[in-house]
Image (cartoon, grey):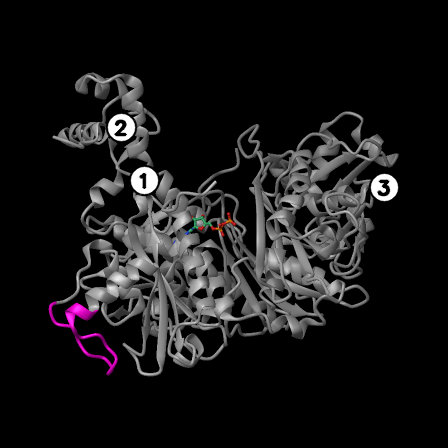
Amino acid sequence: MPGTVQSIERAAAVLRLLAAGPGRLALGEIAHSLDLAKGTTHGILRTLQHVGFVDQDRASGHYGLGPAMRRLGTSQLDVNELRSFAINWADPLAARTGEAVRVGTVLAGQVLVVHHVFRPDDTFQTLEVGAHLPLHASALGKVLLAYRAAGAVPAAHLDRFTRRTILAPRTLAAELQRVRGAGWAADVEEMTPGNAAIAAPIRAHGGLVVGAVGIDGLVERVCDSRYRPHQQLVAFVRDAARSISRELGGLREAA
Amino acid sequence: MTERYVVAIDQGTTSTRCIVFDRRGRLVSVAQQEHKQYFPRPGWVEHDAAEIWRNVERLAPEALRQAGIDAGQVAAIGIANQRETTVLWDRRTGHPIGHAIVWQDTRTDDLVRELRRRPGAAVVEHDSALPMATYFSGPRISWMLDHRPGLRQRAERGEILFGTMETWLIWNLTGGLHVTDVTNASRTMLLDVHTLDWSPAALTFFGIPRAMLPQVRASIGGFDTARHAFPGVRIGAALGDQQAALFGQTCFAPGEAKCTYGTGSFLLLNTGDELVRSTHGLLSTVAYQIEGGPAAYALEGSIAITGSLVQWFRDQLELIASAPEIETLARTVTDNGGCYIVPAFSGLFAPHWRSEARGVIVGLTSYITKGHLARAVLEATAWQTREVVDAMNADSGLDLSTLRVDGGMTADNLLMQYVADVLDVPVVRPLAAETVSLGAAYAAGLAVDYWPDLEGLRQNWHRAAQWLPTMDPAARDREYRNWQRAVQRTFDWTRPS
Ligand SMILES: Nc1ncnc2c1ncn2[C@@H]1O[C@H](COP(=O)(O)OP(=O)(O)O)[C@@H](O)[C@H]1O
């Protein structure tokens, strides 16, 4: 087979071995079973541990499958954990932009709002954590679709919310292509008349997109006179998304 | 005109941080460093004060570098510090005498039991407005003087100095100014909270020579210019960390209260110029004092175990992998299933102050799942808050109308909703999460007219989230009664040996 990566094959073998039995295994047993050098095996185990696929018992030092492995295919990151990682960066984003901030992930074909910071003007607002938004008509949703977060795909039928909502699958595909190219998404009166939003991806280990963070507010504040999002606001949103990704281990620091 | 900034030094229990803030109270940069925790015996907790000062010296330029500014652009420094931690050092060399004894340390247990019975204890408790407890610095100084040969004589000759952490830092920053701020002084049991000076009766009672004590100054405006770490910059303010959080939450008016939800939780209620004496197990403490003005006082309810119960659930029971997962697990069920956890791990703090109590899990049946236990863990924090708020309302005659919250546990929506439900008042989280360091920065900026007045600071406070009560009153009463019955079951568990 051309182009197979040996270390990935070995990692897969380690995972199969750990998944095969109920108990934990010592480093030596794993190396012996797979006929690998201890050093090589240790390197593979450390990497798998780093991404959460393997964990090591504190007392015995033996290895077993990690929590991320058991969750593989369901939800990649606990939503409450995502909020804890985002909270320190969502607040400054609201302070800098003067707009409300939301963090979203995918649940059952919709955006699930996992964190919400009020627009910092002290008007009465209601906490919308747990609310759902349409994937194709919100900035958060477009980001999640564009990067296939949690396997998100556009619905067969796209519901109309305003006269600006994207309804044609091909238009949406082109828009998602643009989002991937630019690294951010916008929704300008596509979900709610008079409102606009900007969002950017949150990445975890290996660059996997696990959520999106964004701002939303009145279209005349978020966009310029030609209905284009203000570049300064886009930059703030992308900065916040990068900061959260860094905490999640999804950004390789440029030296 | 070059932009100017304010720097906060947040000297906490596990780490020290230097944080740069701009004029709108926004965080510009953070430099942080943990220090070593020493546990030489069960119940003993120590820090190396020299290490902490070295960290400050290293963090200061780091924070400025990250912000891209120099010391000339810093309008003032504000200090917020772990309270009650006790440092002794040699006046001549500046070297600490042994390790600092940390606020969590309970080595003075036997001493305190004996002190309670000594004549004069009531006077000391009256002057300081604090109950005789291992929590405060006074008994620790006494213990240190008793346990090191010759130390008391040297202290009497003025060769040994005492300080809480802010005193130690100011001594080092200024190169020899020996002062304390009144909020920190109010946690020693040595301060007469009416005169705001050391109580002669307390000094005699604890056998502490006056010569070793720092001069008591107002929290805001009373300090000199730094010569080290931030050369040439005015030290604008110093406050205990919980008082700083109260200030950072802009609770300037009587009746305003905040609760910081971290490892433990601390609820402080501003009571204005009036020192309110608790008859319900709360502490009376100084909230802050602006130089030349009267002191503002606060009632404080300290809860020992809140976030640390979540840590216990994670690390000892291993039912979750991370603290935030407690919410996910708790949401797998709709109620506690009749189960209650009272985390009296090393006794109960406010309002009970029962050191002999130990934790219980009650209401176990075969129906209970780990989801119910997770609920009970979160509910324990809410009910402990309720007990403190009830005590405050009774002591102050003020009815709490909103609770401002901060700290790591405010990321937990289920918990914050439950707090609003059991208190039956709105719970509000501000946009600035770093309330301790922000409070120190505000106080320092105020001292040098970087910010004009308290009203100006209020303008910086914005609501980031709000949880409104939705619980049915009958259910609330029933649950509270159950909680109170569970608390009763923790009492008298350990017996004096
Ligand atoms: N989502 C959450 N739900 C419940 N508890 C939490 C959550 N996130 C953090 N905690 C708890 O909050 C505490 C950390 O808060 P923090 O304010 O950093 O504490 P401290 O300043 O006292 O160290 C820890 O004890 C942790 O268990």
Q: Amino acid at mark 1?
A: Glu
B212 to B349, vertically: above or below:
above
Bin the neighbour count of mark 3 within 10 Å (Cα to Cα): few under 14, some 14-19, many 20 and up. Answer: some
Kind of element beneath mark 1: loop
Rendered location of residue B94, percent (x, y) = 79, 34
Q: Which residue is mark 1?
A: B318
Instruction: Give the class, few, some or many, for how many residues have Cα within 10 Å of label 2's Cα (few <14, many ≥20).
Output: many
User: Label 2, on which residue?
Assistant: A63
Residue B366, position as x, y percentages in the image: 19, 48
* Residue behind mark 3: B211
Question: Is A115 above or below relative to B166?
Answer: below
Q: Main secondary structure of the magenta part?
A: loop
Q: Identify the amino acid type marked 3.
A: Ala
Q: Is residue B31 left or right of residue A125?
A: right
- Between the residue at mark 1 and the residue at mark 2, the CA separation in whole angstroms equals 16 Å
Question: Which stretch is magenta?
Answer: A156-171
